[in-house]
Amino acid sequence: MTANHTPHTPHTTSERVIGLAAVDRQTTLKAHRMAPLLTAGDPLADAVIAELDFHGPKALKGLDTALRKGLAGLDERPSNAVTALLKDVETTPSWVDPLMLHRGDVVSLSVPPMWFGLCAITGALAHTYASPATARMLLRTDRPTPAVTGRLAEAGVWARQTIRPGGLLRGGPGYVATVKARLRHARLRATALADWDSGVPGLPIGQLDMARTWLGFTLIAHHALAAVGIDITDEEEHRLYQYWAYVGHLLGLDESLYKPVVDHAGARRLQDLLDTMTPAPDDTSRTAVAAVIDAQAHATAQAQAAVLSEEQLRDLIHCVLRRSFGNTAAERLAIPVVPAVADLMPLISTLNRQARHWQTYSPASAESARRQALQEPGPGPEPIAAVLPLGVAFQHRAGGRRSGTPAA
């Protein structure tokens, strides 16, 4: 038996693209072409969420097994929606290099884990929550800090599993975690639609919000790393976006959003276009971003062998975000200017550039650096705690309330 499933029909116009007359005509035309994605969700993932709500915990357990074993490894065929999703994620696009998946994201793996967490993960989440709609979904509680701390940990675990060698191979930890992140977006979307303000343009956690998240872990993350002297070459840029294009495929991102992006320049064009269609940060965004910064500073200060205090780490993150976002965006997010006497960035950037020079001096030294990064304590076996239980845990946290809204 299959749950009823009513897909969201993309519209051709949106309030977000009204008033773009001040923007050049080419950008306006691109925005109008992108407007249908404002109300486009992820029909395959949304249908799975509808089935999970209909069938209950047994279907959830079957989904987890199906993701790890694949369709060919199952004794019996899963439900229609799960079968459709698995066929989608198990069909590897022709442009994917299988050796790339075995190697992992070699560019991100060359970054020391501490800097990857401090800069890449923090920058990505701060960029995501600069969108007021996304921040409002996060802060549906009077206690934002625990919510942000959990999300920070989840994002770190997911990212580390995603970039590791073989992580995105079918049934691998990054593969499973990424598809479950996709389903988590669908769960949030289905729940939010129950009380979504119909006057707010767009769909909660729709295609453009997912594109913003994808840019957070590519363009924004590496801008933040560059701020501390960890730069990448043009060749590494192309490798990075080739790898993350496959992540976009697994996340259910519309191919027209990520496929044309092959380097930072292309990512910036997509970012600029999304910015024209995203409201400016509001107080909710600023609260969420401040909570992300505080949570990361606290977590890093508590780590083994930490050499900076929580206050120093907070100042460091403020410097990183101001350099990677730019002063205008940083002001909108109320990221403070750090006094010159507390600014460690010049020294840190110099040291990191020197270290990276020798790490990438030869193929042997680069491979040695990657092996060292892989030897760092890795994430646990389970990817994202908030994703694993899907609807079951979400209903428990909401006091047992089930979403009565059909999935998209």
Image (cartoon, grey):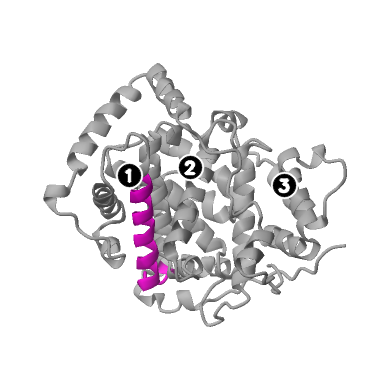
Q: Which residue is mark 1?
A: 301
Of marks 1 and 2, the one in the foreground: 1
Left or right of 223? Residue 316 is: left
| Mark 3 lies on residue | 64
Magenta-tinted stretch: 276-301
- Secondary structure of the residue carrying numbered label 3: helix
Q: Are marks 1 and 2 in contact (CB under 8 Å)?
A: no
- Taking the spot 36% from the left edge, 67% from the top edge, the residue there is 287
Between 349 and 253, the residue placed more toward the observer is 349
Residue 98 % position (x, y): 62, 31
Q: Nearer the viewer, residue 263 or 168?
A: 168
Disc 1 element: helix
Quarter placement of the C terminus: bottom right
Residue at 40%, 68% in the rendered image: 276
Q: Which residue is under mark 2?
A: 241
> Real-space Cα distance between discs 2 and 3?
28 Å
